[in-house]
Image: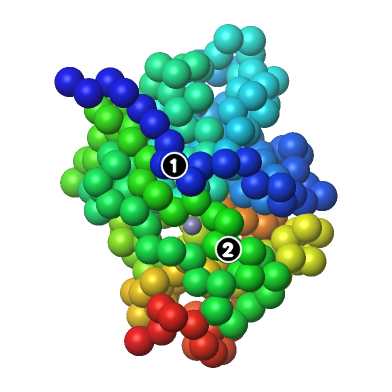
């Protein structure tokens, strides 16, 4: 039994932030989105209840911020039932070890994402040459080495159920990473999209810092399979979500969400796919 956990050797704090950092936003009574620097962490569960789940684990060194925000929402010393990862990029697992140590809760991710979470395989290097803005140019600074969660991480059940989230199901949305998943709840058509699509142009530093809302494909510098990414967005659009919270940018709801998702699927090649970059085939 391997109980050791470690980050990759290239793990470090990243001095990039946004005006929304530290801000929490309620999308519906049991859906809450906390921005840490430039990435969203999602809490699912009614305030003050003892049944809640965390989706994604923020930027490196954001553990205290996440714990503090969770205690504000669910009460002192409250802890979630599980942490679900949409994928294992550094900005979605940045505080995972501190959180697992603090809460002692299980982590779940798609089977195809496990090699990156158990020290077996590094993500491909980010592509600074990809068409895009300053964040893309900065992307060589981003950690891409596998982290090691040992036996704290388990694969999501193959029947598409999500542990501790009975109303939700997971959907395989590869492209940005091989084992990327999104989460969907039929009852109110809520979608947690991870980085399958995002609502801020993640390559562009000005947009990231100001969190300017704009539907966009997955962050370009780390996306390696654009064909799969396009199929994944189509799949999500067909679900007709009413609320969507993504990995980066503000939540989108109602007609704005419907219209912008349709625009993105109809024009994926021009809006999402870069003109040039090393991961274009
Ligand atoms: Zn990502
Ligand atoms: Zn991300």
Of residues 221 and 86, which is closer to you in this image?
221
Spot occupied by residue 238 in the image (x, y as percentages of width and height): 42, 70
**Residue where numbered disc 1 is placed:** 9
Instruction: Quadrant for the C terminus, please.
Output: bottom left
Spot occupied by residue 44 in the image (x, y as percentages of width and height): 52, 34
Residue drawn at point x = 57 percent, y = 41 percent: 12
Which residue appears farthest toward the top when viewing the image? 77
Quarter location, residue 154 = top left
Q: Residues within 10 Å of mark 1 (few under 14, many from 20)?
A: few
Precedes in sequence: disc 1 or disc 2: 1
Q: Residues within 10 Å of mark 2 (few under 14, many from 20)?
A: some
**Residue where numbered disc 2 is placed:** 139
Q: Count of labels shown? A: 2
As drawn, 146 above or below 246: above
Of residues 126 and 249, which is closer to you in this image?
126
Residue drawn at point x = 51 percent, y = 42 percent: 11
Closer to the camera: disc 1 or disc 2? 1
The residues tagged by marks 1 and 2 sit, at their Cα atoms, a distance apart of 16 Å
Spot occupied by residue 246 in the image (x, y as percentages of width and height): 56, 55
Of residues 47 and 24, which is closer to you in this image?
24
Residue drawn at point x = 67 percent, y = 28 percent: 65
Which residue appears farthest toward the front when viewing the image? 9
Spot occupied by residue 130 in the image (x, y as percentages of width and height): 54, 79
Mark 1 residue element: loop
- Which coloring applies here? rainbow
Instruction: Quadrant for the N terminus, please.
Output: top left
């Amino acid at each position: 039994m391997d109980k050791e956990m470690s980050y990759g050797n290239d793990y470090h704090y990243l001095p990039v932030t946004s005006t929304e950092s530290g801000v929490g936003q309620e999308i519906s009574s049991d859906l809450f989105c906390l921005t840490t620097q430039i990435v969203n962490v999602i809490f699912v569960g009614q305030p003050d209840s003892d049944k809640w789940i965390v989706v994604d684990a923020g930027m490196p060194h954001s553990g205290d911020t996440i714990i503090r925000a969770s205690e504000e929402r669910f009460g002192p010393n409250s802890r979630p039932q599980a942490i679900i990862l949409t994928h294992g990029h550094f900005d979605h697992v940045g505080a995972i070890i501190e959180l697992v140590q603090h809460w002692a809760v299980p982590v779940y991710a798609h089977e195809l994402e496990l090699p990156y979470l158990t020290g077996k395989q590094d993500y491909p290097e980010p592509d600074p040459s990809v068409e895009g803005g300053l964040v893309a140019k900065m992307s060589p600074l981003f950690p891409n080495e596998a982290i090691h969660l040992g036996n704290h991480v388990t694969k999501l059940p193959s029947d598409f159920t999500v542990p501790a989230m009975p109303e939700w199901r997971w959907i395989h949305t590869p492209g940005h990473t091989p084992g990327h998943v999104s989460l969907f709840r039929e009852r109110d058509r809520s979608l947690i999209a991870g980085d399958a699509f995002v609502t801020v142009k993640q390559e562009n530093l000005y947009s990231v810092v100001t969190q300017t809302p704009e539907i966009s494909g997955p962050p370009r510098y780390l996306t390696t399979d654009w064909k799969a990414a396009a199929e994944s967005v189509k799949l999500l659009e067909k679900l007709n979500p009413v609320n969507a919270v993504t990995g980066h940018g503000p939540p989108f709801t109602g007609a704005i969400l419907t219209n912008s998702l349709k625009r993105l699927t109809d024009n994926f090649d021009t809006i999402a796919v870069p003109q040039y970059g090393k991961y274009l085939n």
